[in-house]
Amino acid sequence: SQTIHQWPATLVQPVGSPLSLECTVEGTSNPNLYWYRQAAGRGLQLLFYSVGIGQISSEVPQNLSASRPQDRQFILSSKKLLLSDSGFYLCAWSVYTRDTYNEQFFGPGTRLTVL
Amino acid sequence: AQSVSQHNHHVILSEAASLELGCNYSYGGTVNLFWYVQYPGQHLQLLLKYFSGDPLVKGIKGFEAEFIKSKFSFNLRKPSVQWSDTAEYFCAALNTGGFKTIFGAGTRLFVKA
């Protein structure tokens, strides 16, 4: 069966520090991978998605970047965090099939607090 | 622009009451529609989905949703809620064959025992 891991679960970082959040998927090949930010009352905001190694699509221009160095690894980064980067970050994966149509499976999330 | 709107941000019900959560989408072309649920302390997970065919779809835990194309709606229903249904519910839409899923703002449901 497929599983998705995210770490760390919680993170407190000072303004101006770098960020690296990691997401890995097991049990599937060539998944589509996604990074979302969830804010209370605002739903899930798609930040980046990737359909293959090295292929990154950015949905929201901001202080973050994403990379996919391996098929089942997706990394969210920042060189210098801002207060507004605080939030709950979710990683998700999907595989397009006739039955799932890119239904997404979510990880446990990372709670980031920037002070 | 593509968008998904959920009508209620907070809903409070007593056990055994009926539930209907509204969802409207604004999309061109053929869409696939989803309801996801996030129980306290758990991962976001799929509740049900609509791709084609019968517009009334059934999901887990007694939930169902009806796709009404003319109204661009995909409302979630449950005849009798339980305390364990307390969660946040998200409606989502995706162009058929696409990758970018748009989520609504979510509805927090609290069921009083």
Image (tube, rainbow, N blue to C red):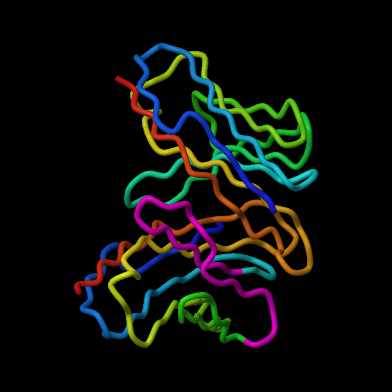
State the residue at coordinates (32%, 52%). A41
Q: Quadrant of the C terminus of chain B?
A: bottom left
Residue drawn at (63%, 47%) of the image: A3
Left or right placement of residue B31 versus residue A110 in this view = right
Q: Where in the figure is residue B6, as x and y percent of width and height?
A: 39, 66
The correct choice, above or below, for A71 with respect to A81 in the image is below
Quadrant showing the N terminus of chain B:
bottom right
Residue displayed at 58% across by 25% down: A65
Picture coordinates of residue B39 (x, y %)? 39, 59
> Magenta span covers which residues?
B33-54
Residue A29 location, quadrant: top right
- Left or right: residue B6 versus residue A99 is left
Q: Work out whether residue B82 or residue A31 is closer to the camera in this orientation and state it.
A: B82
Q: Residue at x 42, y 44 (%)?
A: A38
Taking the image as shown, residue B108 lies to the left or right of residue B101, namely left
Q: Quadrant of residue A77?
A: top right
Residue B96 on image: x %, y %: 71, 64
